[in-house]
Image (cartoon, coloured by chain):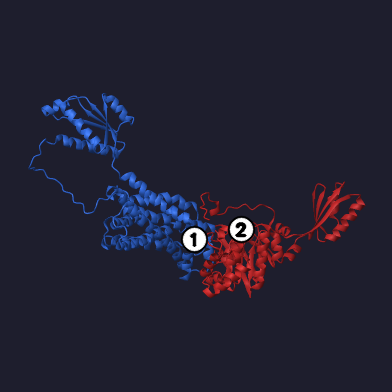
């Protein structure tokens, strides 16, 4: 076993002497956390709404007053008055406004005779998020419009009371578990993929193969050193990321121990997977070429950025076997809910089984000679 | 006992036969040179001897151990310097040696004795703490030579150790190798493209071509084995048209090459042919403008046995060829 530690020692000494490599591999996940966290987390504001009032009656004025209130209150919308509906729609198509609110000429009369009064929202539905925000705001506006002037004391309508068991989770915190897994994957990809194949192509592995090291010591050396590097990356990002995202009690010692366990198991699972992928590769371009593909196929179906319940069936299949899924779930449990081992035992079990299968397959493919 | 004993060894890659039944022996303490054009099968042969490649047929004994059946014993007995520079650039000179000593399982006390000794031998003791990336090409090679000897092997394999080095560094590498060899009980098998080096340093030389052994002897005997031990280069003025044919009849002449008024005359007796040429020129009223006598070099031997055609062959891509190669250090 001492020969295995010689490989580990060599890898870690080299790792320590490459500060640029360490920084680059950690900056990428942190940049994702901050940029994605703030890019997707916020509420949409200042959507431009063209108001075409063709009615000018009292009810129409009330609608416009409510819209004005929404505009100066939550600032979701900015209002622009248009006299001509045709011009408003042209501007909508040209992207100058995000929606057109039309109050038709008959509106006041229909309100008076209670004949289904309607206002129209014409929206640019190429941007779902904007369209939903706009429809939501204007729906709310009409709900207030329809409210009776004096509330009814006793109502027969059923309502839903929502109880939130955890404090509010901003999107940046929701993203953090995926980012921790991503940082582990980055280090696995660089250490276990790119550098591993470069070393092989440069003939460094020949240097190992002419020594009396056994196949098992060689495989263990590569993978133990890869795991250690990935654990260092995962732990660093888990701590710095928690501080950036504002996770409550970031340094809770018990959670830290559990995090450490999940990071080690995840790092080993990913390094096993990478070793299986790279065991017969010799071309240094290969790991670079599949980097983006692997990242996409593993990261996005994992539930790290969007709930898996929204996936089509075929993608749910990918999500089921994706080791990221289980790692992300475990980190979510620990970072967002601070749960105990019960909640993550299943994840750990899957990751360990995954590692065992990948490592066994890779070992049988590994050649002790060239 | 023979340090290396190669017995009808064969290596095929699919339909291609890289090494085609080579046999030879290397005695203990010899410096044995393996020469051959690019793609002749030298590297494949060495790779089989150092247990990197399993032979398709035949076998070899290295240090008394069978490369197929006792590969771990062979690995313990040999030191290997591969063609590519494989030192860890980020690590110091001493760390490079230390890691390899550990890979070979050299115990701590022995490491502490052997590493400074070797660094002294390759004259790098004062650079022991410097990262290898700050060293010149020749110094890096010397690091690798020291690294290959940390476990005190009995047989040392070096694949083109001086390729890419300047003449001073080349000489330094060879002098160190000779000194180390004389101090230890070491057998050296080396490949090189520099014939002058092979001539000066190798006790015996094997020339390999198309996967076969085409010649094997000491440098002196090899030079004597080819036609024309000497080459006369003579420049004549006003030579008659049949001059080349007349020169060919002179004593000891093997072969004539005429290039305008310059004639290259291969001869088995340089001084004898020189006298005959001078006499013939005087008799025919031909003026000798210049005359030089060269002895046969290993270059001539090499070309004689392997021919002149270029060996263009496909080979596997290496990291250095990749446009995206990550340069570390």
Q: Nearer the viewer, residue A149 or B225?
A: A149
Q: Residue furthest front?
A: A72
The blue chain is A
SS at badge 1: helix
* Placement of B16 over or under A38, stated as above or below: below
SS at badge 2: helix
Q: Nearer the viewer, residue A347 or A71?
A: A71
Label 2: which residue?
A: B137
Q: Nearer the viewer, residue A70 or A314?
A: A70
Chain B tint as drawn: red
Q: Residue at x 32, y 63 (%)?
A: A257
Label 1: how many Cα within 10 Å (few below 14, some 14–19, many 20+) = some
Question: Which chain does tag 2 point to?
Answer: B
* Place of residue A168 in the rendered image (x, y in percent of width and height, measured from the top left): 25, 50
Q: Is residue B49 visible?
A: no
Q: Is residue A190 visible?
A: yes
Horizontally, residue A141 falls left or right of residue B307, namely left
Q: Residue furthest left?
A: A154
Q: Looking at the rendered structure, which numbered label has been put on residue A14?
A: 1
Horizontally, residue B242 falls left or right of residue A187, namely right
* Placement of A130 over or under A3, stated as above or below: above
């Amino acid at each position: 076993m001492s020969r295995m530690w010689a490989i580990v020692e060599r890898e870690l000494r080299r790792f320590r002497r490459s500060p640029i490599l360490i920084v680059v591999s950690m900056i990428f996940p942190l940049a994702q956390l901050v940029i994605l966290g703030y890019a997707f987390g916020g509420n949409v504001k200042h959507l431009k709404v063209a108001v075409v009032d063709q009615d000018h009656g009292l009810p129409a004025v009330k609608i416009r007053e409510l819209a004005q209130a929404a505009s100066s209150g939550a600032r979701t919308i900015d209002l622009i008055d248009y006299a001509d509906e045709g011009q408003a729609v042209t501007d909508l198509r040209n992207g100058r406004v995000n929606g057109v609110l039309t109050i038709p000429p008959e509106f006041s009369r229909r309100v008076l005779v209670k004949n289904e009064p309607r206002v129209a929202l014409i929206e640019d539905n190429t941007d779902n998020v904007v369209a939903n925000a706009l429809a939501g705001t204007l729906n709310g506006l009409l709900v207030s419009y329809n409210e009776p002037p004096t509330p009814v004391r006793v109502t027969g309508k059923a309502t839903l009371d929502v109880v939130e068991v955890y404090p509010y989770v901003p999107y940046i915190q929701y993203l953090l578990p995926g980012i921790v897994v991503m940082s582990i994957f980055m280090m696995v990809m660089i250490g276990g993929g790119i550098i591993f194949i470069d070393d092989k192509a440069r003939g460094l592995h020949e240097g190992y193969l002419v020594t009396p090291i056994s196949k098992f010591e060689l495989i263990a050396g590569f993978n133990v050193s890869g795991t250690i590097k990935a654990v260092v990356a995962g732990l660093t990002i888990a701590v710095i990321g928690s501080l950036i995202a504002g996770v409550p009690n970031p340094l809770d010692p018990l959670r830290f121990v559990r995090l450490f366990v999940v990071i080690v198991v995840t790092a080993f699972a990913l390094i096993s997977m990478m070793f299986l992928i790279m065991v017969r590769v010799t071309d240094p371009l290969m790991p670079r070429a599949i980097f983006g593909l692997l990242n996409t196929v593993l990261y996005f179906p994992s539930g790290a950025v969007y709930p898996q319940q929204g996936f089509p069936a075929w993608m749910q299949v990918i999500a089921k076997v994706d080791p990221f899924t289980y790692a992300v779930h475990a980190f979510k449990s620990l970072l967002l809910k601070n749960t105990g081992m019960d909640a993550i035992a299943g994840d750990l079990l899957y990751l360990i089984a995954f590692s065992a299968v990948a490592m066994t397959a890779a070992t049988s493919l590994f050649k002790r000679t060239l | 006992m023979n340090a290396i004993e190669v017995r009808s060894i064969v290596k095929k890659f699919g339909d291609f036969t890289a090494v085609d039944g080579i046999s030879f022996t290397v005695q203990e303490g010899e410096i044995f040179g393996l020469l051959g054009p690019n793609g002749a099968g030298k590297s494949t042969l060495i790779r089989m001897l150092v247990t990197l490649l399993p032979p398709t047929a035949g076998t070899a004994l290295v240090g008394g151990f069978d490369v197929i059946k006792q590969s771990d014993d062979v690995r313990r007995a040999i030191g290997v310097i591969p063609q590519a520079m494989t030192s860890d650039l980020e690590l110091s000179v001493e760390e490079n040696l230390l890691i390899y000593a550990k890979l070979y399982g050299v115990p701590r006390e022995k490491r502490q004795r052997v590493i400074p000794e070797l660094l002294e031998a390759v004259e790098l003791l004062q650079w022991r703490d410097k990262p290898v990336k700050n060293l010149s090409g020749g110094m890096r090679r010397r690091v690798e030579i020291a690294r290959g000897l940390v476990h005190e092997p009995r047989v040392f394999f070096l694949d083109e150790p001086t390729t890419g080095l300047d003449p001073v560094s080349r000489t330094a590498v060879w002098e160190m190798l000779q000194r180390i060899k004389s101090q230890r009980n070491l057998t050296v098998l080396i490949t090189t493209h520099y014939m002058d080096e092979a001539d000066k340093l190798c006790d015996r030389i094997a020339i390999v071509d198309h996967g076969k052994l085409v010649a094997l002897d000491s440098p002196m005997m090899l030079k004597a084995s080819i036609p024309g031990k000497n080459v006369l280069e003579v420049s004549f003025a006003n030579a008659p048209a049949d001059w080349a044919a007349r020169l060919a009849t002179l004593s000891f002449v093997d072969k004539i090459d005429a290039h305008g008024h310059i004639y290259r005359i291969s001869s088995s007796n340089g001084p004898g042919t020189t006298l005959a040429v001078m006499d013939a020129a005087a008799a025919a009223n031909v003026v000798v403008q210049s005359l030089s006598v060269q002895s046969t070099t290993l270059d001539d031997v090499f070309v004689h046995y392997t021919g002149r055609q270029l060996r263009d062959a496909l080979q596997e891509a290496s990291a250095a060829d990749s446009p995206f190669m990550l340069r570390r250090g």
